[in-house]
Image (cartoon, rainbow, N blue to C red):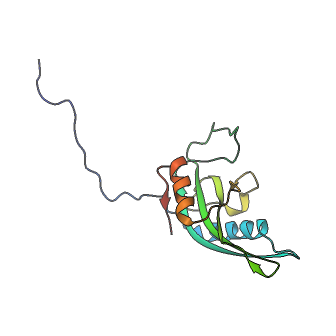
């Protein structure tokens, strides 16, 4: 009978925490457009949308309570926190923070195919938060491995 430990420790270094998306700015600009469209100014309110921080989630997430998580291997999501300022009837409302992004993303040659994105890929939970920290706490509760990418 052999004696000794049956485990081996391997140290790994130099690995990247998140996917390297070479066209990340294009993806974030597309997300900016979706966010501005969702927070359009009108005759009674003016909205100012400001991108805050973006995050990588190593899986595809869904807006639906009945989300189908099948066939999502290799997919990921990029979420961005936005500060939404509203001026309603010449009165500034308190700033709110919302999350927008895209899910079901894949990389090909280190790029996301922006032209193939559809409404099925859009992510927004439509919930408003009072601070960035509140948003982060909520995201980290649902996605503990979330990591900042910008």
Q: Residue 5: percent from the left, percent from the top?
A: 16, 31
- The relative height of residue 43 versus residue 38 in the rendered view (above or below) is below
Badge count: 0
- The relative height of residue 20 versus residue 25 in the rendered view (above or below) is above
Q: Residue furthest bottom?
A: 90
Q: Residue 148: percent from the left, percent from the top?
A: 49, 63
Q: Residue 120: percent from the left, percent from the top?
A: 74, 51
Q: Is residue 109 visible?
A: no
Q: In the image, what residue occupies the spot 33% across and 59% down?
A: 14
Q: In the image, what residue occupies the spot 86% across and 74% down?
A: 42
Residue 3 sits in which quadrant? top left
| Camera-nearest residue between 84 and 78 | 84
Q: Is residue 51 left or right of residue 56?
A: right
- The relative height of residue 92 versus residue 71 in the rendered view (above or below) is below
Q: Is residue 66 visible?
A: yes
Residue 117 sits in which quadrant? bottom right
Q: In the image, what residue occupies the spot 12% across and 28% down?
A: 4
Q: Is residue 40 left or right of residue 115?
A: right
Question: Which quarter of the rendering shows the N terminus?
Answer: top left
Q: Residue 137: percent from the left, percent from the top?
A: 52, 55
Q: Is residue 77 left or right of residue 37?
A: left
Q: Residue furthest right?
A: 43
Q: In the image, what residue occupies the spot 64% across and 53% down?
A: 103
| Camera-nearest residue between 144 and 112 | 144
């Amino acid at each position: 009978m052999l004696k000794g430990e049956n485990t081996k420790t391997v140290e790994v270094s130099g690995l990247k925490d998140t996917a390297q998306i070479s066209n990340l700015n294009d993806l974030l600009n597309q997300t900016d457009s979706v966010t501005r469209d969702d927070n359009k100014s009108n005759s009674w309110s003016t909205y100012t949308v400001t991108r805050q921080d973006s995050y990588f989630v190593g899986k595809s997430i869904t807006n639906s309570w009945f989300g189908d998580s099948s066939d999502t291997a290799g997919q990921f999501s990029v979420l961005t926190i936005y500060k939404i300022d509203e001026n309603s009837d010449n009165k500034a409302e308190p700033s709110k923070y919302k999350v927008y992004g895209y899910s079901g993303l894949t990389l090909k040659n280190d790029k996301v195919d922006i032209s193939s994105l559809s409404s099925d890929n859009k992510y927004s939970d439509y919930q408003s938060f009072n601070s960035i920290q509140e948003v982060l706490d909520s995201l980290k509760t649902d996605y503990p491995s979330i990591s900042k990418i910008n």
